């Protein structure tokens, strides 16, 4: 693609992602509190003054205000522009990864995986804040994943059978996800005498299975467990956590799923080539 055409497209994708990130900030703050996502419009949580439209410009609004409310001058958390920028970068990476894979298929893959990563980011931040994973997000994400699988199956095979086959793959992945992590919860409770993870993690795994299918769910789960063990073990060794202190696992599941979206096919192909070269 010509660079003169590519630059405006890249800028548009990043701005779109940053705008979605701005909405994710609203979801992360309001959903656990049981507040409406739409009303009232964005306002300062301290003085409750409604923000101006130009104050809500993703990333740049925070910079323009120098990280403080225009009215009460209380600090605005730096996490807000960081989430907006991170979402913009994620959208851009998805576009660069999938946007060139055929016109229609690439379009739907880009749209779908941007939505999936947005769900994962919102769930990760809520889990970090509250140690919970809201059912409303995991359940809606699971249904969206099945719709995505059906659409991709139809576009790939160009018939209804391909769509049904992909939806079944998503259903199997969802069932495997919730069964596998429920089993981990039960075994962990017996071995360690306390819950190894929360019930919301199993529901998040089911959502991931709906989007990724059973094979890539297993890869994402393995990556999540490896990353969680490494970070958790390091935190315990440094005295930042004790062995009985709970640690949110949702962000590790989300990170494993995100890595699988971008690198899953290559990782799985390398694994099969190394250990099953004759298959």
Image (spheres, rainbow, N blue to C red):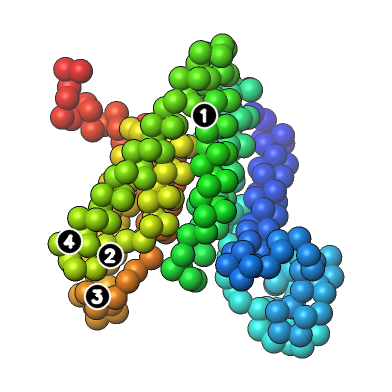
Residue at disc 1, secondary structure: helix
Residues at discs 1 and 2 in contact (Cβ within 8 Å): no
Q: Is residue 146 above or below residue 17?
A: above
Say which residue label 3 marks. 244
Q: Which quadrant of the structure image shows residue 49?
A: bottom right
Kindly check if marks 1 and 4 are in contact, taking CB atoms under 8 A apart as contact: no
Q: Quadrant of the C terminus?
A: top left
Q: Earlier in the sequence, mark 3 or mark 1?
A: 1
Residue 149 as seen in the image, left or right of residue 172: right
Distance Cα–Cα, label 4 vs label 2: 8 Å
Horizontal side of 253 relative to 240 (left or right) equals right
The residue that mark 4 highlights is 190
Q: Quadrant of residue 196?
A: bottom left
Q: Residue at x 46, y 44 (%)?
A: 207
Residue 149 got which mark? 1
Distance from the alpha carbon under mark 1 to that under mark 4: 36 Å
Vertical relation: 30 (above or below) 104: below
């Amino acid at each position: 693609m010509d660079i003169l055409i590519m630059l405006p497209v890249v800028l548009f994708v990043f701005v779109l992602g940053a705008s979605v990130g701005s909405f994710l900030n609203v979801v992360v703050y309001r959903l656990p509190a049981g507040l409406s996502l739409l009303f009232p419009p964005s306002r300062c949580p301290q003085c409750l003054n409604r923000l101006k439209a130009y104050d809500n410009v993703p990333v740049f609004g925070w910079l323009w205000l120098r990280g403080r409310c225009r009215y009460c001058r209380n600090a605005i958390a730096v996490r807000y522009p960081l989430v907006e920028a991170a979402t913009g970068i994620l959208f851009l990476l998805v576009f660069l990864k999938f946007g060139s894979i055929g016109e229609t298929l690439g379009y739907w893959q880009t749209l779908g995986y941007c939505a999936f990563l947005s769900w994962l980011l919102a769930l990760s931040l809520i889990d970090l804040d509250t140690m919970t994973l809201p059912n409303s997000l995991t359940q809606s994400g699971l249904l969206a994943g099945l719709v995505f699988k059906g659409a991709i199956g139809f576009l790939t095979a160009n018939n209804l059978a391909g769509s049904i086959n992909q939806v079944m793959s998503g259903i199997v992945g969802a069932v495997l996800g919730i069964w596998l992590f429920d089993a981990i919860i039960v075994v962990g409770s017996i071995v360690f005498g306390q819950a190894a993870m929360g019930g919301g993690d199993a529901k998040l795994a089911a959502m991931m299975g709906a989007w990724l299918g059973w094979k890539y769910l297993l890869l994402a789960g393995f990556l999540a467990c490896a990353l969680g063990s490494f970070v958790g073990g390091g935190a315990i060794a440094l005295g930042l956590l004790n062995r009985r202190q709970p640690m949110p696992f949702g962000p590790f599941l989300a990170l494993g799923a995100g890595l699988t979206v971008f690198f899953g096919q290559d990782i799985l192909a390398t694994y099969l080539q190394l250990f099953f070269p004759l298959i």
